[in-house]
Structures are given as structure tokens and as C-alpha cells.
Amino acid sequence: MQTEFSKEQNLLRDVVSRALRDKSPATAVREQMASDRGYDEAVWQELCGDAGLAGVHVPEAYDGAGGGAVELGIVAEEMGRTLFCGPWFASAVMAGTALLEAANESDRQPLLPGVADGSTIATLVLDDLNGPAGVGSSIRVVEDGKLSGTAAMAVDAHVADLLLVVARGVGGLGLHAVQGGASGLMVEPLQVVDPTRKLSRVAFTDVPARRVGDVTREALSRIWDRICSALAHEMIGGAQHLFETTVNYTKERYQFGRPIGSFQALKHRCADLLLEIEIARALTHHSARCLDAGEGEPYVASMAKAAAADAYMSAARAGIQLRGGIGFTWENDTHLWFKRAKASEVLFGTPAIHRERMMTMLEGAA
Amino acid sequence: MTPDQIRREVSAWLDANWRVDRPLVEWRNILLEGGWAAPHWPEEWYGRGFTLDETAVVAEVFREKDVVPAAQVGPRGLASETILACGSDDQKGRFLRPILTGEHTWCQLFSEPGSGSDLAGLSTRAEFKDGKWIVNGQKVWNTSAHHADFGLLVARTDWDVPKHQGISYFLLDMRQPGVEARPLRQMNGHQSFNEVFMTNAEVPPEDLIGGEGNGWHVAKTTLSFERRGFSRRVRGSSLDGPKQGPIYAEYEEELRIATEPYTWYPQREGRVDLVLPRARETGAINDPATRQEIAKLICLYTGARLASDSAEARRKAGTTEIIPAGSIGKLAASVIARQASYVHTMISGADAMLSGPDSAADGIIAEVLVSVPAISIAGGTDEIQRNIISERVLGMPKGYRADQGPFRDIKRNA
């Protein structure tokens, strides 16, 4: 199994990093987070339509770049670093992964290329975002394959052309394709803590849908793992950004006639944070390599998600605290990352849920 | 040379020379003359100029053939590497051979009661009188000093210059009336270290190493070998199980004495390996709170190992980035040991009050609970590691220092 990034993968990171620094500066983040749609369509076209960032993990047969979880993670990490605003996570990561893991071949062919080239904005609708066990509790297949029920929260559903919905039918869970704007579909944008990632309540009342595949327990677990690994990468990128800017701030800020970074109380907190991020990063990169190779601990994705979430929140708390009062202002950018950290910590399972999931995989249920 | 060539050459030599009925020292002298005692040393000093990887191949063949290697366990490795790096030809000629043969054991005389983390603040005094150095002062944390023949000693020879500049480094004969080693008992009951008292101890001028006032530089050389593990090559040396033949009896006795101070070291690292078996055995594995803490431990342990492997791979690939793998790894080991100790306590519950043969894992768990504090102190405290990481990796500014100028004027412990 791979243990380091290849030359091509490092190159991908450089290209994505440069593009995002250019297209997603903090000023753009602030502009998009205040908008209703939440992203800039011209930037979306450049990054996903032209540069192919929504298809890095999609096989070439579906017009993707043919990479895997490692490539997806690289893009996620750089997006997390710049707090990129756009439906990339919902469409490429969530919907793309669901199609790859659960859709029938005959249904992938018409749906996946559009997701891979960014021309279709898709999302995955789950009626529980805490853990795979709760999925299928509300949304049901009613007569004629139509869907009824509610997802309390769905990522970027307000801009989705295509909603992939996991719903319970007579034969168990299935993946269902619903067109944006379908009759009986109600998408209601929600007020959120992290405005850089929009959430909506999605209610289905006899909504026409097409079943595109079965979602077995194993498939749902694989989908969950891949999404969590990508999310962990995104969190590591954000944590690294906060860490670097915070350390730099302590070198520039003077109090008591000295840079505050010369005080051991701050130095030691930064050293501890470095260690926490290094460990979380190692677990995160390991998770993607294991998913691609089909090797490693069965609970790698949960280790990565739990560790990255804790590290991101540590970086976010330190980012505010080490800046003092200025860090608590709206004007300072730190809170933008703090809020993303908080939202990502709980999306697809809190660290505690993932630690219990690890132990269940390792030792069985308590 | 390729590993196969090395393998063939050392195998042929061993087939011709290795015998289990030779006395230990006689065998090691043959080993020295053959150039296989320390293959990573230069050719003029018993070696072959091998890289550490090539040397590892030689060690592997020794293990496969159950051959007794040169003496290497304990502080003697620090002595030989330091003398090889900084000593004069006369010193190398006198000291290296008996270290490799095992005739001389060594100890390190660095830390003092008044200078722990601030090693350069040491105040053991060496004065040149009547053609020799006279040493007065006290050292502490001296592994193996109670049976050592020689000590690696740092002492202050000039009190009127800044602290790092007034230190000299000596090779001290421990077998003299002015040197007394007293065992020091630790909170876990073991006696792994000593205090060493020097009262008008003598060092001949030819046993000053690296030149007068240059002791800090030589000490840093020793410390770099210590960080690279030259003080405790236990695994590389022990043979698998008892072997038949007179030489093995001598060797096992040497190993027993040399490794005795380290028997509790696995316990200070937290015994992560015992966590799951004990949790299953006691049923604690079904307690949700304990499960959370075990999962945190697994994440820390797995992540730290992966991070360390990755740093090692980048170092081998010749990266230019600063990776203080030692400091990060040491800090990680402290965090892991603390978490493991915490989990062991949760698993034991009230039984954690017991120690000895009737307690969990034949007393091992009790030893973990009272040994883990050591890992955050030995070899540079967690706080010193955090200073190193923040200053060298993160480039954070150094703090205010109150120890500049002549050492004589600096405030220190009474």
C-alpha cells in the first residue's frame, strides 16, 4: 500500500492549491456566505467544468480523472484550507460516492458524467446525518415508487439539479434519483451556524423518483466511510490554515514589549496543537490510502473523522483564544473557520459516535 | 556493497572464526581484529566505514548464527561514539578497544541536582592544579554508575565566561577514592540510577576530551547519540533464548547487568498492548465511557506511529523541511502513556489501589500507574520538547533569558 504521495498527487495538490488561493480568498468566502445560492457559478465552471475537480475520483469511463479517495482527499484538503464555498462536497463527494458505491451500472452511465464535469449539481439526501444506522427512518417509498418523508437537513439541496435519496422500500433501502423542482418536493433553506455550507430541510410528498440501486448495509457503510474520509481531509486543511495563521499572529502581535509568541504559555499550546494536527493528518491520509487499497483497519475512516474533528476544533479554539479580543470580532476571519469546524465536527457523526463505531467494528457492540 | 555481498562476507568470516568455547574477551578481540565489531566505524578504528543500514545487515547475520557481538548495551555506546567523534588518537587507542570487548563499562555524568533541563547551568567544578584536573561536585541520574569503570563527565572550568563557554568534558576514572556512587530510589521502587559525589577526584590532562572550554560541543555530540538510541540497544543485542556454550553464560551475565536498569521501561510507556486484553477479561470493554477512552488511545497510538513512519520516509527521501521527529515523537509518547495509564485505571476500578503479585497482570499494571510520570521527564521534559518544537519548527521567538553574561553572576540553586 502507498505510504507517501506520488509526484502526480503532489502536482495535483499544487495546482488545486494555487487555483483556490486565487478563486477563494476570504473576501470571496464572505461574499458567497452572505448570498442565497452560496457560490459563484463562474468559479464553479472554472474549477469543476474546466479543471475537472468534481471528477477526480470518478473512473474515466464516466468522464472522470480516474483517481480515488487519495485524490478526492487532496482536493478536499485544499478546499477546506480556503473554506471554498460551493456544492463540491455535496455533489462530487456525497452524491458522486453514492452513485459509485450503490447505483446500477445502467444508471451510473446517464448520471455520473454530469456530476464529474460539474454540469449537474447533485446532492445526497439522508434522513439521518449522525450515523448509518438511523438512515431510512423517515423517507419511504410509497406507491408507484414515489417518495414521502422528510430529511431534516440536506447539504446544498437548495441548488441541486439532482437529489439522490436513500429511502426505505419493501426490499430494504434503495438509492432514488429525484429531479430538482419535482412535484411534491419542498426544499426549505435553514438558518445555519456555518453559512459557508448551506443546509435545507427537504420534505417529500409523493415525489416521483427512480430507483437507481440497492443500498445494502455494507454499501451504506462504504459510502459513509468515503464521505467521512473526504470530510476529514477538508477538516485537516482548515485546521492547518488556522494553525499557520495563528502561529504567525503570535509572532507579530506585541504585548509587554515582546512578541506574544515568545511566551511559553502560547508556545506550548502551539506545540501541542502541532502534535494533535500531525496525528490527525496521518490518520486522515492513511484512511484514504486504505480505502483505495482495500486494506488496513476496517475502522480507518472513523479514526480519521474523530481525530480530524477534534484537531480542527482545537485549532479553532486556539485561533480565537490566541488572538484575544480581535479573534472574537466579526471583522476578523477566524470565526469563519471556527464555524466550519463546529459544523464539520457533527456532520456525519460526532467524534464520540465515530469512536463508538470504531469499537463496534473492533470488538462488537457493547 | 549490496546486502547479499555483506551477508556472504560476514558469514564466511564467522564460519571460520566463531566458536562457543572461547572466553568472551578473547572472542571479542578476534572480532575486533577481523573488523566486524563495529562495522560502521572507520577502518583505522576496528570498522569498515559501513552505513547504519549495512551495519544492520551484519547484526542480522550475527543474530541468525547466534553469534555474540561486541559489547554495546548501556551507556558504553555513548562513550565509544563520543570518543570516536571528538577524541584524540591517543584516547581512541586507549579507550575504544576495552569498550568493544566489554572489559570497561561506562556511565554518563551530566545532570546535577541544580541543573536538570538547564544542563549548561551545571556547577561541578574542575580546576587544574599540579599537573592534573581536580573535580568537586555532585551528579545525578547516572545509570550504571555503581559498577562503571569510567564516566563521561562535564564540569565547569571557567566561571568568568558565558555558561556554555566555560564547560569542559572529561573521561573520569570511577575507580578512585574521590568518586562515590550511591543508588537513587525512584517513586516506582526501582533503583535504575545513582547519585555520584566527586570530592577532589582526579583526571589526568590527557583525559580532557575536545579541548578546554569546548565541553558543550562534545556534550551535544553525546546527546545526539543518546537521542538516536545508542544508550539502549537492548533489542539488537539479545539472543533468542538461552544458548549452550560457555561464552553464552558470560554474555548473558553481561546483558543481565546492563539491562537491569531498564526492566520497567515498557511500563513507563503505558503498556498499550495490555489494554484490550484486560478490557475483555474484566468486561470493561462493554462500558461506553471506557470504550470512548480506548478508542482515543487507539487513534493516538496509530496516528503517532503513522506520523513517525512518514517523517522517517521524508527524511530518507532527503527533504529540506525541518522535522524534529525526536521531539514530536517524544511528546506523542508522553500523551499516549498518560492516556494508556488513564484507561488502565478505568479498567481496574478500585483494584487499581493494589500492587504486587496479587494485583492485575502480576503487578505490571500497578507499575504502569507509578512509572508513567517518568516518560514526561526523562530525556528532556515535555516542556523542553514543546520549546524545541515551537522555536525550531514553528519559528516562534525565543523568550526572555536571565542567564547571559559571566556564569559567576547568574542566579542559580543554592
Image (cartoon, rainbow, N blue to C red):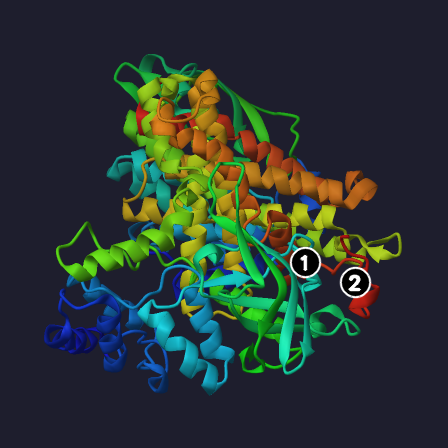
Q: Nearer the viewer, residue B53 or A207?
A: B53
Tell me where residue B93 appears, x and y as whole percent. Answer: 41, 83
Report the side of B11 relative to B367 (left or right).
Answer: left
- Give the spatial CA distance, label 2 vs label 1: 10 Å
Q: Using a 10 Å C-alpha cutoff, classify the residue at mark 1 as few (fewer than 14 neighbours), some (14 to 19) or many (20 or more).
A: few
Pointer 2 with pointer 1, Cβ within 8 A:
yes
Q: Chain of mark 2?
A: B
Q: Nearer the viewer, residue B78 or B298?
A: B78
The residue drawn where x is 33% and y is 44% is A291
Name the residue rendered at 56%, 61% in the picture: B179
Residue B105: mark:
none
Residue denoted by label 2: B403
Regarding residue A221, the answer to whether it shows in the image is: yes
State the residue lying farthest toward the right.
Answer: A257
In the orientation shown, which residue stands out farthest toward the front?
B177
Side of B153 relative to A286 (left or right): right
Q: Amino acid at mark 2?
A: Asp
User: What is the three-letter code of the residue carrying label 1?
Assistant: Asp
Sequence-first tag of 2 and 1 = 1
Which sits in the foreground, A92 or A132?
A132
Pointer 2 and pointer 1 on the same chain:
yes
Residue B392 left/right relative to B314: right
Residue at the image position 80 percent from the left and 42 percent from the top: A324
SS of the residue under disc 2: loop
How many circles with numbers are drawn on the protein?
2
Q: Which of B187 and B129 lies nearest the eye of the viewer? A: B129
Q: Secondary structure at mark 1?
A: loop
Residue B55 higher or lower than A97, as above or below:
below
Tag of residue B118: 1
